[in-house]
Amino acid sequence: MTNRDEQIETALTLLSSYVGRGLVDGDETRALVLAEAGVSSLALASIIVELEDSMDREFDFEAFAGMETVGDLLRATGLT
Amino acid sequence: MKVDFHTHLATLEALPEVFFEGQRDNIRRLMPPDLPAKVRERVPDRFGLGPEDALGDRHVAEMDAAGIDLAVSLIIDFGLAFPGQVPELTDLFATHRALADRHPGRFLVFAGVDPRRGVPGLELFERSLVDWGCRGLKLYPPCGFSPSDRRLDPFYALCAEHRAPVVIHTGPTTPKLSFAHTHPSDVDDAAWRFPGVDFVLAHGAVVHTEAAALLAEYRPNVYLDTSGFQAEHRRGRWGSTLGRLKERGLVRKILYGTDWPVHRQYGTQATWIERLAGGDGGPLSPAEVRWILEDNPREILGLER
Ligand SMILES: [Zn+2]
């Protein structure tokens, strides 16, 4: 498992706790719309900060503009 | 010509830090109890102005990408509500003039004056209309006055004379300010007494929608803007909200507004304009989308076709 795979797993584990069910990486998960899955904008901010913490870096404010799906989140954090 | 009827200059002078700090106070109370302390501390920081854009270059680039031709840039006079925390009002007017000058034809500036400034405020407003090219008035009642306050009468008289619309904030805002005077019904008396002035209920398509729609339905000179619909969209409610407004026959009373730079972290101008129609199977026809983006603002602003 690469470092990146581990980070994706960390991100999905985090997301899972907000969505309320276990998310496994794949097309279906990546297409999941965050708002529809119950991820509020506050929850999203928490996820981003937790990811920053675990990846030890800071994301650009604007990288998150227009983020809708799990796939968008992974892209915005540079994980895919 | 596509118009965004509700935007602001993205600077901490136009939208001061204290404004966002109030919102962060609320966010701290809304966070789940079991978040790690480190995260708890940093989450509120993600809710703020974001990068400044004093010259409007970023804003114009986003407008271009979205196909928006013209934006109304609203000055808010926070001077009396947040003393010492915002620049002199005349300086704020100057920065907005510079914005319009730098991007010819892309911005119409609406003056913001707290009516408690009295005669000097009125003179500033008149000067902005006559000499500086301002095209309307923006009022922010949460600063502590009613939009139907009689001290505004001379301002509204000037608006009637210059055919200048008035954009009035409605609904809650930063908890640093009072929510009194933010109900659509607070606008009714002024709209009734000044039938020759067009009143736009800012956020009227998304907050207090029942009361806002009622006023827009029965008062010819009352309109609603969509600013804040981004949050409604995120919650999956925008299509149905829009549908109810359409059912009441109000599409001609709706103006497209984004409140840029607010909501910036959740989308670009290009994404928002796409979402205006309420998504696939949304309630609006292409012609109705055109009314909201083009015909309605053109008529209110007295622009050429
Ligand atoms: Zn606004």
Image: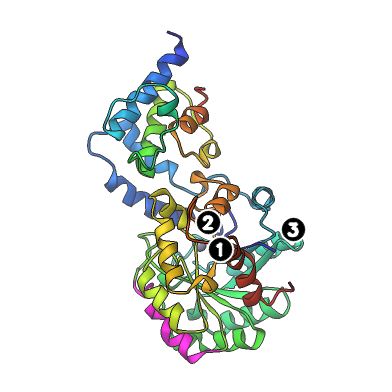
User: Residue B135 location in percent, x, y?
Assistant: 66, 74
Amino acid under disc 2: Leu
User: Residue B217 location in percent, x, y?
Assistant: 44, 79
What's the image's color scheme? rainbow
* Residue behind mark 1: B256
* Protein chain holding label 2: B
Foreground residue, B124 or B266? B266
Q: SS of the residue at dot 3?
A: loop
* Protein chain holding label 3: B
User: Residue B123 location in percent, x, y?
Assistant: 62, 83
Q: Is residue B65 left or right of residue B263?
A: right
- Residue A6 seen in render: yes
Between discs 3 and 2, the one toward the N terminus: 3
Foreground residue, B180 or B176? B180
Between discs 1 and 2, the one toward the N terminus: 1
- Residue B204 seen in render: no
Q: Is residue A50 above or below residue B206?
A: above
User: Residue B265 location in percent, x, y?
Assistant: 50, 44
* Residue behind mark 2: B276
Amino acid under disc 3: His
Q: SS of the residue at dot 1?
A: loop
Q: Residue furthest left?
A: B33
Mark 2 Cα-neighbour bin, 10 Å: few <14, some 14–19, many ≥20: many
What range of the chain is rendered magenta?
B180-195
